[in-house]
Image: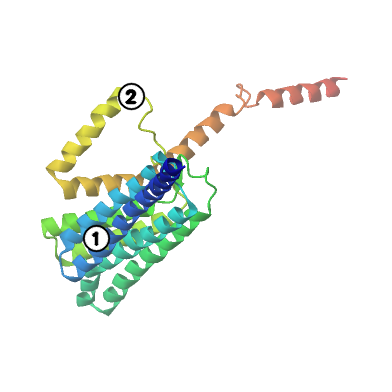
Amino acid sequence: MKSSKKVTSLDRARRRGIYLLPNLFTTAALFAGFYAVVAAIDGNFRVAAIAIFVAMLLDGMDGRVARLTNTESDFGKEYDSLSDMVSFGLAPSLVVYQWGAASLAEYGWAWGKFGWLAAFFYTVAAALRLARFNTQPAKAGKHHFQGLPSPSAAGLVAGLIWYGSDAQLTGLVALAAAFLITAMAGGLMVSNFRYLSLKNVSLGENVPFAYVLLIPLIFMLIALDPPRVLFLIALTYAFSGPALTVWGLFRKSRSRRGAEPAEDDSGLTGAERKGHGRDQGRDQG
């Protein structure tokens, strides 16, 4: 009896540890987002941008750990959503405002207003994006996301800050880029563009051999120039949504043209020729 009770208590402790594990990753992502804000206040914008990328990495791991250990829960989903709001909604907007948007005020009162309005718009867009994602059916976002995911939007903003800090971008051009990228990221988050989702890709599935070569190639490129490559990857993914939408509309228009009945030399389709023949028969009768 004592041994069975001991096994039961150990089993309960193990279960508590498993359920705690994905939430630890979520907490770490939340800390990374918070640290990004602290680093930006201290003027360490490069560190702040890196912290946002670390939060993205940890955010991707907590969901996978929960699925692998079969420990998904409503608490974990809500906690992850709140963590995303801080790390990918509030932190990027505050960091980019500290980095460049606030300096727009030096060029006039109107520019200063545009700076904080862009940062606030991004924050609101992230909140709306997360709320829409949380209220969608579970199967709706299995292969595609509706709107740019908030971690990807944060990566776009953080990539600009990291690249701009390393390249020492200054002046009105850099400030305008910060304003435009922030506003664009916010707009894409609340858009209806569809983005490919990789969150349900199983590591045990068979993949083409080219994928095995592509993954280390991406890591090599990132290692060569992290800020530039990460910013280009984030920018490419951000534009992939509108590009896929345009490509889908183009394919639909081509399929509709192919489905239209062919016309003969008289300019009549097959159905029109049949109707025309019946009318001629009535006239001759």
Residue 186 drawn at (x, y percent)? 37, 59
Residue at image coords 65%, 26%: 269
Relative placement, left or right, of 84 versus 169 is: right
Q: Is residue 171 above or below residue 224?
A: below
Residue 68 drawn at (x, y percent)? 39, 39
Relative placement, left or right, of 136 versus 58 is: right
Number of the label disc, if any, that sits on residue 208 = 2
Residue 256 drawn at (x, y percent)? 56, 32
Quadrant position of the C terminus in the picture: top right
Number of numbered discs present? 2
Number of the label disc, if any, that sits on residue 177 = 1
State how far apart marks 2 and 1 are (Cα): 38 Å
Number of the label disc, if any, that sits on residue 101 = none
2 or 1: tag closer to the N-terminus? 1
Residue at image coords 22%, 37%: 218
Residue at image coords 37%, 59%: 83
> Residue lying furthest right in this view?
285
Relative placement, left or right, of 19 versus 234 is: right
